[in-house]
Image (spheres, rainbow, N blue to C red):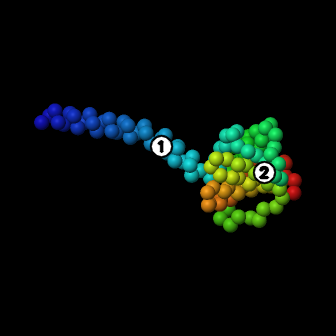
Amino acid sequence: MSWVFIVLLIVASLIKVLAASAPSGVVDKVGKRFQLHPKLSYDVTVKRDGKALSEEEAQLIIDQFNQANFLEKYYYAPAPEGVPYEIETKQGRFLVYPYPDRVDVFKYQKKKVSSYSLRSKTMQGQATN
């Protein structure tokens, strides 16, 4: 009877060790999927006024977008003004509107549209309305 207890103890210990280490990777993967302001890679297309930007300009915009701080999510999106940066990714499309006081982002993913505001001093400096 004691050997059954020892086997159950070993199995329970292995399950506990596996369960303790596995969730961090799973949570990270699921969290990135539903993240409102994701970090973008460089394999995206960046356009302004329908024209593709050069590779250096696109990398600069992506760096500024990735370094921007999230301010707030809009449940009723503000009316956009000006010409946006259009960022096309595999997951969806982003329209980025820089203003002197904030940067508004409209995220189009499948049939869902989200809008939020960012703070980025470098992108806000490029605001031309």
- Which picture quadrant has residue 129? bottom right
Name the quadrant of the N terminus.
top left
Bin the neighbour count of mark 1 within 10 Å (Cα to Cα): few under 14, some 14-19, many 20 and up. few
| Residue visible at 23% across and 38% down in the picture | 8
Q: Report x, y in % for residue 60.
A: 78, 40
* SS at mark 1 in the image: helix
| Residue visible at 48% across and 41% down in the picture | 24
- Which picture quadrant has residue 82? bottom right
Disc count in the image?
2
Q: Report x, y in % for residue 106.
A: 70, 57
Q: Report x, y in % for residue 115.
A: 68, 59
Mark 1 or 2: in front is: 2
Residue that badge 1 annotates: 26
Residue that badge 2 annotates: 85
Nearer to the camera, 73 or 57: 57
Do we see residue 121 in this rendering?
no
Do we see residue 33 in this rendering?
yes
Marks 1,2: beta carbons within 8 A: no
* SS at mark 2 in the image: strand
Nearer to the camera, 102 or 29: 29
Q: Which mark is residue 82?
A: none
N-terminal label among 1 and 2: 1
Q: From mark 1 to mark 2, how far is it between C-alphas?
A: 33 Å
| Residue visible at 70% across and 43% down in the picture | 44
Query: What is the three-letter code of the residue carrying label 2?
Result: Tyr
| Residue visible at 59% across and 50% down in the picture | 35
Would residue 18 appear left or right of 29 to someone viewing this image?
Answer: left
Residue positioned most to the right:
128
Query: What is the three-letter code of the residue carrying label 1?
Result: Val
Bin the neighbour count of mark 2 within 10 Å (Cα to Cα): few under 14, some 14-19, many 20 and up. many
